[in-house]
Amino acid sequence: MIPVEPDDVARRRRRATVEVKQGLRELGAELALLNRRVGTRLGLKDIDLDCLDLINAHGPLSPTALARRAGLHAATTTGVLDRLERAGWVARERDPADRRAFLVRALRERNAELLELFAGMNSSVERICADYDDAELERLAVFLRRIADAGRDAAEGLTGG
């Protein structure tokens, strides 16, 4: 058996880390392209689709909370919400905790349209996941959550939090 030199181990690790970073950049670009095409099919701008996704995932949200999550200025958020509401994707409702404020909720009956457009990607992810055992999938899920957290922290660092 040929002994492995510490320099070889370090070099392989650096190379693997670089490949992960390149893979994440490529994934980000491909997902952005997919989202752009979905948005085009729905008549939504990229930022509209991003905000709709945030509302679906975390809503109902106040416009201020949405702006903070999306990293948008309040005026930009108002424009996004106006477009989403006109297109029938969201509804604004009075906040039961503060009658002067309102919350934005996604109109769930429209989700089938989104799911249909993402069906190809979702099917591909299901097929890919089938190649991994439960422990590997759990480890991948933790990795992806940590990467998402790192991206959020980096974005907040660029905007001053």
Image: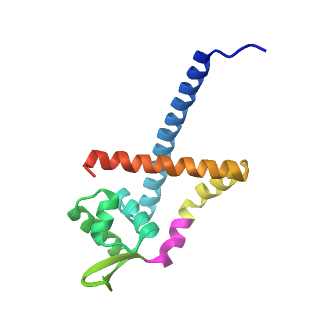
- Where is the N terminus found, in terms of image quarters? top right
Q: Give the side of residue 83 with respect to residue 24, left or right.
A: left
- Give how far across and how far down residue 160 sits, in percent: 25, 49
Q: Which residue ends up furthest to the right in the rendered image?
A: 1
> Closer to the camera, 11 or 39?
11
Residue 151 versus residue 94 in the image, above or below: above
Query: Can residue 26 be seen in the rendering of this structure?
Result: yes
Q: Give the side of residue 86 with respect to residue 126, left or right.
A: left
> Closer to the camera, 79 or 20?
20
Please give the name of the residue rendered at 30% of the width and 66% of the height, measured from the top-left corner: 80
Residues drawn in magenta = 107-115
Residue 108 versus residue 58 in the image, above or below: below
Residue 47 versus residue 55 in the image, above or below: above
- Give how far across and how far down residue 20 sits, in percent: 54, 36
Please give the name of the residue rendered at 24% of the width and 62% of the height, measured from the top-left corner: 76
Q: Quadrant of residue 62?
A: bottom left
> Closer to the camera, 45 or 152?
152
- Give how far across and how far down residue 60 sits, in percent: 39, 75
Please give the name of the residue rendered at 58% of the width and 16% of the height, measured from the top-left corner: 7
Q: Give the side of residue 88 with respect to residue 63, left or right.
A: right
Whether residue 109 is in magenta: the answer is yes
- Give how far across and how far down residue 89 sits, in percent: 40, 73
Scheme by which the image is coloured:
rainbow
Q: Characterize the magenta stretch by its predominant secondary structure.
A: helix
Whether residue 23 is in magenta: the answer is no
Please give the name of the residue rendered at 51% of the width and 30% of the height, measured from the top-left corner: 18
